[in-house]
């Protein structure tokens, strides 16, 4: 069996930052209870591992004791959640991905300018809930083109669309094109809202899936960007399966031991889960790994302000603790690998 591993895959800069924030808070505050509002990222293994270390996850900040530490998840929060936490004297550390914060700031800015905001995304996703909360009276969520006739539009010349950062670029384009046809004067965001990591991982699958018999996406079912990767593979003509880990592999999916399998991971899936999937398949079927570099990523985000303050209080220089994202380190060295660099046209 040939296993093709695309780069990039797995953790993006925002996820790495959010996970690192909780890790560092645990290190800085041994013995103190640490609360996280919502899952820090949408991956059952990441959340489970933090629970094993004593982290308590809540969906309501009123459940956090007065004065305790609370970390906001990478997906962003409505402002009333932040206000509620600060009003009760909680020690707040905001691990919202800076690229999500960018969309929040756009919503605030356009609402102040008198625009109605059409937010393209999944209504019940935590990121969309957070962004909508910045300007609830001005924002309507558009999940499909079928929603467009039901929108309440006051002035079609004062409209702007924004998007959830983890959407499929293909699906978003269909909705945005429909919005432009319905409202020719609609304004686009100043820069692309779908994040670089989502775009890169989708383009890698779009490029490599046609060479394969099956795509396995390592990620949890509540991960929007992971689901999108399976859909993009299917659109490219290759079946895509979403698995949380190697225990979810169904060997009936493989037509032959000689199949070529693309193995990627959503932006919140740990790399050790990818390694486990590779090891499981190679031990059963034999074969080789081919590592394919589609895009290079070298992005980092500095720790959030709340964590910086906590570091300074303990004599730690925050500049020494920036989070960097590098190419995944997997089991190629153990099994041997052929490296290949692929140019993917049409990169956004």
Image (spheres, helix red, strand yellow):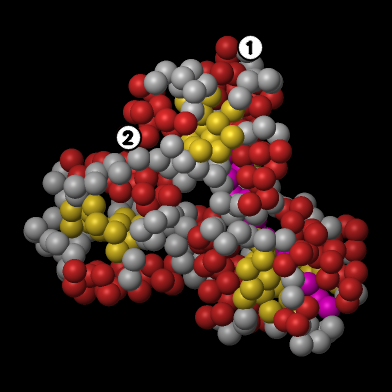
Q: Nearer the viewer, residue 237 or 123?
A: 123
Please report the bounds of the magenta region as a residue range.
Answer: 1-18
Question: Farthest residue toward the bottom?
Answer: 255
For disc 2, the marked residue is: 80
CA distance separating discs 1 and 2: 32 Å
Sequence-wise, the earlier of marks 1 and 2 is 2
Residue at image point 29% right, 73% down: 145
Q: How many marks?
A: 2
**Residue 43 within the segment the image draws in magenta:** no
Q: Nearer the observer, disc 1 or disc 2? A: 2
Residue at image point 29% right, 64% down: 142
Percent coordinates x, y for residue 322 in the rendering? 61, 32
For disc 1, the marked residue is: 315
**Residue 9 within the segment the image draws in magenta:** yes
In this rendering, is residue 305 above or below 113? Answer: above
- Circle 2 packing at 10 Å, graded few (<14), some (14-19), many (20+), is few
């Amino acid at each position: 069996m040939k296993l093709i591993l695309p780069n990039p895959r797995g953790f993006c800069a925002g996820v790495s930052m959010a996970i690192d924030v909780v890790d560092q808070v645990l290190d800085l505050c041994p013995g103190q209870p640490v609360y996280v509002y919502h899952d820090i990222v949408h991956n059952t293994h990441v959340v489970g591992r933090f629970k094993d270390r004593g982290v308590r996850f809540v969906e309501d900040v009123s459940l956090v004791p007065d004065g305790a530490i609370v970390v906001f998840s990478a997906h962003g929060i409505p402002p009333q959640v932040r206000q509620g936490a600060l009003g009760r004297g909680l020690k707040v550390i905001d691990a919202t991905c800076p690229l999500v914060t960018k969309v929040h700031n756009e919503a605030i800015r356009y609402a102040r300018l008198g625009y109605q905001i059409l937010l393209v995304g999944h209504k019940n996703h935590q990121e969309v809930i957070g962004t909508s909360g910045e300007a609830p009276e001005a924002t309507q969520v558009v999940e499909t083109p079928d929603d467009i006739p039901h929108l309440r539009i006051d002035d079609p010349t004062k409209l702007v669309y924004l998007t959830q950062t983890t959407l499929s670029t293909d699906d978003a384009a269909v909705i945005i094109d429909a919005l432009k046809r319905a409202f020719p004067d609609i304004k686009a965001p100043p820069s692309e809202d779908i994040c670089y990591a989502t775009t890169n991982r989708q383009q890698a699958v779009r490029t490599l899936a046609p060479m394969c018999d099956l795509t396995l996406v390592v990620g949890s079912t509540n991960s929007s960007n992971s689901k999108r990767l399976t859909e993009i593979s299917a659109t490219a003509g290759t079946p895509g399966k979403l698995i949380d880990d190697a225990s979810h592999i169904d060997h009936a999916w493989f037509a032959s031991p000689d199949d070529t399998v693309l193995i990627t991971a959503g932006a919140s899936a740990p790399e050790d889960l990818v390694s486990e999937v590779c090891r499981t398949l190679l031990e059963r079927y034999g074969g080789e790994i081919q590592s394919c570099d589609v895009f290079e990523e070298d992005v980092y985000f500095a720790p959030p302000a709340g964590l910086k303050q906590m570091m300074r209080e303990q004599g730690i220089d925050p500049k020494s603790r920036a989070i960097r994202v590098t190419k995944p380190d997997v089991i190629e060295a153990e099994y041997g690998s052929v490296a290949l660099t692929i140019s993917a046209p049409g990169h956004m």
